[in-house]
Structures are given as C-alpha cells and as structure tokens.
Image (cartoon, rainbow, N blue to C red):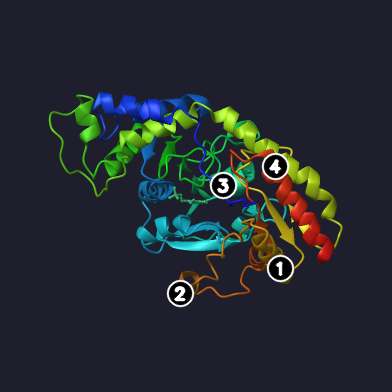
Amino acid sequence: MKVPFNQVFYTGEEMEYIKDALARRELTGDGFYTRQVSSLLEKKFGINKVLMTTSGTHALEMAAQLADLKPGDEVIMPSFTFPSTANAVMKQGARPVFAEIKEDTLNIDPLDIERKITGKTRVIIPVHYAGIGCEMDRIMELAKMHGLMVIEDAAQAVNARYKDRYLGTWGDIGCYSFHGTKNYISGEGGAIAINSSNPIIIKKAEIIREKGTNKAQFLRGEVEKYSWVEQGSSYLPSDLLMAFLYAQLNQLEEIKSRRRIIHDYYTEQLKNYLDSGLIRGITTVPGDCDSNYHLFYLLFESEKIRDAVIFKLQRSGISAVIHYIPLHSSTMGRRLGYKAGDLPITEKVSNCLMRLPLYTGMKKEEMEYVVAKLREIFKEL
Ligand SMILES: Cc1ncc(COP(=O)(O)O)c(C=O)c1O
C-alpha cells in the first residue's frame, strides 16, 4: 500500500460553485464568492473585517505593511516557522528576532518573548503551530504592557480556538492560509483578519490590497474616482478560487471532525511508546485549546532514530516528513547573524520531529497501515 503524506480533499461541491462563478462573470476582485467566503469567516469566527488574499504569505505581507514597520524595527517571532513569517517583515526593512518555543506545544515561549523585547521591538508574531493556539492571553498582556502590535500567523489554524476565542482573532491582525496543504483549501489562497474596528486601518488594508488605490471606496460610492494613494500590490484572489473555497468552508466542522478521527487514532495507538526510549513527544492538545487537527507529529529521542524511522516508512510506501529547518540556522538566518546553538530547544525539536501522513480523506486502512508499520519498525529499533 502507498500512503502519501498529504492529499487534496474535495467536498464534492466545488464544481457546482465554480460553474456558478463562471455564469456570474464576476471573476476579478471581490466577486460574489469572494464576498461569500469573507462574510462566512467574519460571522463564524467573530472577525471585524476579513479580506481574502492570494496566499497566507500575502496576508502576512499586508499585515507587516499595515504595522508601518520601518528599517531598524524589531519583530519577535519563533524561528520554528515557515519563511513567509520572516520575509513579510524583512520586506518592510524590519529585523526578525527569533524566540524559543516550548517543548510541549512547539509554540513561541512567552517568557522568551519577554526576554527579547527591546526599545526597538514593534510587533510580536505568534505562530500557531499545528493548529494549536499559542498562549494568547499572556502574549496580549505583554504586548499591551510594552505598546506592541500583535499579528497572528494563523496560517495553520483556521477554525481552531485558544480558550474562548478563535485563533486569528486575538491579535490586532490574523493571517490565514488556504494553501493546498492546509485543512481548508483553494490551492493557493489566504485571508487577512482585521480585528481592530478602526476604520482607518481597514481602509488602509483595502488600499494596500488594491494596488495602492482607493478603488474599494470608489466601488462603495465614497469617492468619485479612484487613484494611486499608497504603496500597494495586487493581493485579490480570483473569484474562481473563492468559489472552490466556499465549497470547503461550507464543511468547516465536517472536515475538522474527519481530521480529528485520524489524529485521535494516532494518539491512542502511539502514546504508549512515550516511555519506550524511542519517543519523547507526541502532538498534544492542551486543555485550553480546541485544535483543528492540522498535523500530527512524533518527537524522537534522537535525530538518528528519527531519520531511520522516516527511511523505513518510505520503504513501506509511507511518506513521513521532517518539519521546519529553523529560520535562524538556515542560510538566510545565518546571514542575519544567527548561528546553530542560538536556540537549542528549536534545534532539538527540528532534528527529532517527524510528521505522519494526515489528510481529510485518509481511509481507515491507511491509518491502520501506518500504525502497523510503525509498530514493526519500533520493534526492530
Ligand atoms: C506558519 C505558516 N506561515 C505562513 C505560511 C504561508 O502560507 P501560504 O502558503 O498560503 O503562502 C504557511 C504555510 O505554507 C505556514 O505554515
């Protein structure tokens, strides 16, 4: 049997909505389905304003521009994240300052954020790894105390909560991804959630997203003509993609519960290896978090064991992967002045982490095969 690492899931309604979008002939910016999905996200998660974007990366870029970052400003974020988190702030000339993660959730450690705040710090970007929430109450408190803005990188965290609030709605801004590897997809796509009710920020976000023009105000009849008013780019997705996404978001809970079954099965079957000397960690959802079950990982005792397990799974047709070469020890991170050894927990996690296949349409036989092969491998080690 072959088990891929990830597989695109169709709800079955995508084609119907795409055909409807074609018939409506509103394919460019903020057409019918773009409006549908943004208002669905606003209502479901309780967001003041959602603007759909071409990717999670672009949502982060918009957020960094909205934060009005200047050269010399510092932005605290985990090193254990995707390059887009850091690229966004560097595009504005600001410097990413990498903080440690906690071993239990692999999320940014609020104590290390506190240690890294300087007179130059302007923004904190918590990243909700695996759809499990960072300690947002503590992070918001720190931000308030030091007058900092919070941009949540919730790329992996659509439809997940920390305490009583959805991820992406705690900070000033939240950024979502609908990339083909995520829980809810449009192939490429994203959204920026603006939680502030300040109309100036919302207007500025609309302008940045529309090539630096006030076209959105023009379309609402607020100005007579539209023109270039700010530096911006083109961050609006095609309505065809948003029609596809609408079919996915219509099954927000169904998709989450399908993923939960796989996640819970892995946990149940593998947690007793925790004391075996092979595994020292397993995806754990803390009691104050409601996960969206984006991914499932195991943390091995050593890199050598992890690599051997990946190799043996591969030979059995199962694709399991490592996750995140830390940004601080990557080529670009070294160029920023970081070096291996600067963030020991992050480095150890990155060296010992393996992600198992987890996709919405995963069949029972596939999960059982993965677990059976893992059991065999663990016996041999
Ligand atoms: C934490 C994180 N941030 C940002 C991104 C970028 O999102 P996108 O691929 O939609 O640009 C991703 C996913 O790819 C991610 O996992």
Between 312 and 248, the one nearer to me in the picture: 312
Q: CA distance from mark 4 to mark 2?
A: 46 Å
- Is any part of residue 52 visible from this angle? yes
Q: Amino acid at mark 1?
A: Ala
Q: CA distance from mark 3 to mark 4?
A: 51 Å
Q: Are marks 1 and 2 in contact (CB under 8 Å)?
A: no
Residue 308 - label = 1
Which residue corresponds to mark 4?
Answer: 365
- Is any part of residue 48 visible from this angle? no
Q: Amino acid at mark 2?
A: Arg
Q: Nearer the viewer, mark 1 or mark 2?
A: 1
Q: Nearer the viewer, mark 3 or mark 1?
A: 1
Which residue corresponds to mark 3?
Answer: 145
Q: CA distance from mark 1 to mark 2?
A: 31 Å
Between 235 and 318, the one nearer to me in the picture: 318
Image position, residue 314 (x, y; %)? 64, 61
Circle 1 Cα neighbour tier, 10 Å, few/some/many (<14 / 14–19 / ≥20):
few
In terms of sequence position, does the residue under pointer 4 or pointer 1 come before the other? 1
Q: CA distance from mark 4 to mark 1?
A: 24 Å
Residue 335 - label = 2
Quarter of image, res 140 = top right
Q: Nearer the viewer, mark 4 or mark 1?
A: 4
What is the tally of numbered marks visible in this picture?
4
Circle 2 Cα neighbour tier, 10 Å, few/some/many (<14 / 14–19 / ≥20):
few
